[in-house]
């Protein structure tokens, strides 16, 4: 496989931390919530101030797209100010909307555009242009909108919004928060009740934030553990300030580092604690981690708290497959924690990891094997043998394959390992966690 590096790769050699990690930090804002805050504030009447927005490339593309659709968006320091247009009042964009690498933004915005009577064209980078959009275009077309895509239902795509959108009623064939969200957002400018049935509960950030902006969203349980979500349009959104919680997926890296580096104690303030996102925290506690929640509160419709983490002696764990959706992005760093635990661990039901930014399952296995950890894959389970006092951990080179989570997991491994760990490239960590290396150094990591 050909390797494509950024113009300037940033390799890093990570040695065991010589001091405990200590201090109080905040992690970047939650990406899922940042996209939704910009979109809903643009559809609201009045002025919304957003604090803590994740200023990564993906989210900035969403801001650019909403500006092109007529919202006025400015930012001063930490604060982003959005003057909304109101539902139904978006203006036709003069140019193509470029969504960069963000599948979330492309799919959610497709929903909004499908029920506004304007024509728009959407594209993205090479990676996004290779991903099929059929999952959203099929249900969205039921409201009278029309989508013209390239072969294979791919971007660039023209969207001819429906002038009088009818409400959609749809049962999701597979669980997808993005498809559910696209349909609900389309329903904001449709006449009547929009209904989505999901077979299993998926991330509910869209529902929480719609309520935050004053839209009544109805959620009913249906047999087999699924849910029926409905709203009635046309809906009016009222401007309402948003504080974006810290991303729980990003907090995973300093948390595991503090658990593994002896005598560490850190506090991470304002982390999102949505139960559909915190499978990792539950798993680490089962392994014996001291992970305390303090100062719990609700921000922007989401539960938030401060996390206090103390270095802990971890033991092996058996993680059930049904926990995978609530921690899908955290398996690489969990695997690192398992490598330092007493006894072996079994992480079950990881088929979804084969289709992330890279084949994250095989890349995680390679990261461990290169550094002397004994690991094997049986079907969709990963089995990791914990710490063996006769066998040092570390000493290898990790090929990150431009996967930001693998790069950060490798750094965490190095901070606790016996021998230095070489990471081939860290340049792209900033896409999801701007300033990660300097934040870890502020805790004493010495990178």
Image (cartoon, grey):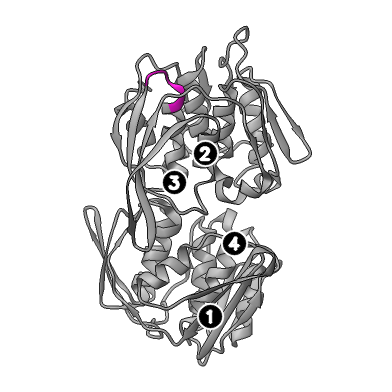
Res 19 quadrant in image: top left
Comparing labels 4 and 2, the label whose residue is closer to the camera = 4
Residue 6 image position (x, y, % from top left): 49, 38
- Disc number at residue 405? 2
Q: Give the residue number, with chain letter if any, for mark 3.
A: 248
Residue 30 image position (x, y, % from top left): 41, 52
Of mark 2 and mark 1, the one earlier in the sequence is 1
Q: Residue at x 63, y 74 (%)?
A: 137
Of mark 4 and mark 2, the one earlier in the sequence is 4
Q: Residue at x 47, y 86 (%)?
A: 233
Marks 2 and 3, how far apart at CA: 13 Å
Of mark 4 and mark 1, the one earlier in the sequence is 1
Q: Residue at x 42, y 24 (%)?
A: 311
Task: Verify whether residue 391 appears in magenta.
Answer: no
Comparing labels 4 and 1, the label whose residue is closer to the camera = 4
Marks 4 and 1, how far apart at CA: 25 Å
**Magenta region: which residues?**
259-263
Q: Give the residue number, with chain letter if any, for mark 4.
A: 201
Comparing labels 2 and 3, the label whose residue is closer to the camera = 3
Q: Residues within 10 Å of mark 4 (few under 14, many from 20)?
A: some
Q: Secondary structure at mark 2?
A: helix
């Amino acid at each position: 496989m050909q390797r494509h590096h950024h113009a300037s790769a940033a390799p890093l050699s990570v040695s065991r931390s010589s001091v405990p990690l200590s201090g109080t930090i905040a992690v970047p804002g939650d990406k899922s919530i940042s996209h939704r805050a910009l979109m809903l504030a643009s559809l609201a009447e009045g002025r919304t101030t957003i604090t803590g927005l994740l200023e990564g490339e993906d989210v900035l593309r969403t801001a650019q797209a909403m500006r092109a659709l007529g919202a006025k968006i400015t930012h001063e320091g930490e604060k982003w100010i959005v003057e909304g247009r109101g539902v139904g009042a978006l203006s036709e964009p003069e140019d193509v909307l470029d969504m960069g690498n963000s599948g979330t933004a492309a799919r959610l915005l497709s929903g909004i555009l499908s029920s506004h009577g304007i024509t728009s064209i959407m594209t993205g980078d090479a990676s996004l242009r290779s991903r099929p959009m059929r999952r959203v275009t099929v249900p969205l077309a039921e409201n009278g909108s029309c989508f013209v895509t390239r072969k294979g239902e791919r971007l660039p795509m023209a969207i001819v919004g429906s002038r009088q959108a009818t409400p959609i009623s749809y049962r999701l064939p597979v669980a997808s928060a993005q498809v559910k969200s696209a349909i609900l957002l389309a329903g904001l400018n449709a006449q009547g009740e929009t209904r989505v049935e999901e077979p299993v509960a998926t991330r509910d950030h869209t529902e929480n934030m719609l309520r935050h902006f004053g839209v009544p969203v109805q959620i009913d349980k249906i047999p087999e553990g699924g849910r029926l979500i409905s709203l009635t349009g046309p809906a009016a959104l009222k401007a309402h300030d948003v504080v974006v919680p810290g991303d729980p997926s990003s907090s995973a890296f300093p948390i595991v580092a503090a658990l593994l580096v002896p005598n560490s104690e850190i506090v991470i303030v304002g982390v999102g604690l949505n139960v559909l996102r915190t499978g990792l925290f539950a798993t680490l506690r089962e392994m014996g981690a001291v992970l305390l929640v303090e100062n719990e509160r609700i921000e922007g419709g989401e539960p938030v708290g401060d996390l206090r983490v103390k270095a802990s002696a971890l033991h092996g764990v058996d993680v059930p497959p049904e926990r995978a959706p609530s921690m899908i992005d955290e398996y690489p760093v969990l695997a690192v924690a398992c490598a330092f635990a007493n006894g072996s661990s079994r992480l079950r039901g990881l088929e979804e990891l084969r289709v992330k930014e890279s084949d994250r399952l095989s890349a995680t296995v390679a990261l461990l094997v290169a550094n002397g950890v004994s690991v094997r894959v049986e079907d969709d389970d990963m089995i990791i043998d914990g710490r063996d006092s006769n066998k040092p951990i570390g000493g290898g080179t990790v090929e990150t394959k431009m996967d930001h989570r693998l790069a950060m997991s490798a750094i965490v491994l190095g901070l606790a390992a016996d021998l230095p760990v070489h990471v081939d490239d860290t340049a792209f960590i900033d896409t999801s966690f701007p300033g990660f290396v300097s934040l870890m150094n502020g805790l004493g990591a010495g990178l």
